[in-house]
Image (cartoon, rainbow, N blue to C red):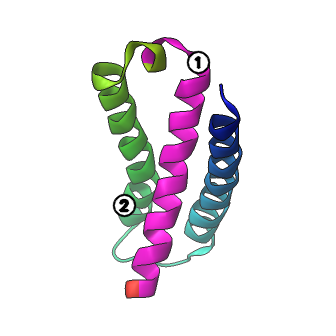
Amino acid sequence: MDADEVLAFIVSAVGAVAFVVIWYGKLARVTKLGSGGWVRVWLGVTPVGCLIGLQWFRLRYAAREVREQGEYDALFWLGGIAWLYLTTWFLGLRG
């Protein structure tokens, strides 16, 4: 990995940790979410489903070196989680 890829890895790792702590921390603290606990289950499963879709797309359409090297696998997983964090943060600003 090049220096810029290492920087992207570090930034993505920080964003991924922030997303997991904030998203699932808030989800664990909420006492009432609509009718029953199914809403909480769906909110917990949705980010995982998004990452599975990202993995499927990456394995099918990415360049061969990206598909075969584990560093890129971790980079794309962390980057995907960081993008989820940025998306939820931006949507929170938009209301």
Please give the label number shown on residue 70: 1
Residue 16 falls within the magenta-colored stretch = no
Evaluate whether residue 52 shows in this view.
yes
- Type of amino acid under label 2: Trp
Q: Which amino acid, by three-letter code, is at mark 1?
A: Gly
- Tell me if residue 75 comes above or below residue 84 in the rendering: above
Query: Residue 84 at x, y = what percent?
Result: 46, 57
In the rendering, at what x and y percent does residue 1 appear? 65, 25
User: Does residue 14 appear left or right of residue 44 in this picture?
Assistant: right
Q: Secondary structure at mark 2?
A: helix
Identify which residue is drawn at 62% across, 23% down. Answer: 71
Residue at the spot x=37%, y=45% of the render?
A: 50
User: Is residue 38 or residue 43 the one in the foreground?
Assistant: 43
Image quadrant in which you'd find residue 42 = bottom left
> Compared with residue 46, is residue 65 higher up or lower down, i.e. above or below?
above
**Most common SS among magenta residues:** helix
Image quarter where the C terminus lies is bottom left
Dot in front, 2 or 1: 1
Query: Measuring 52% from the left and 62% from the top, which residue is drawn there?
Result: 85
Please state if 83 lies on the left or on the right of 59 as rendered: right
- The answer for how far apart the CA atoms under marks 2 and 1 are is 35 Å
Residue at label 2? 38
**Relative to 87, 73 lies left or right:** right
Question: Where in the figure is residue 21, as x and y percent of width and height?
Answer: 67, 60
- In front of the other: 11 or 50: 11
Q: Which residues are magenta?
A: 67-93
Q: Secondary structure at mark 1?
A: helix
Q: Mark 1 or mark 2, which is nearer the start of the sequence?
A: 2
Q: Position of residue 10 (x, y in %)?
A: 71, 45
Which numbered tag is attached to residue 33?
none
Q: Quadrant of residue 41?
A: bottom left
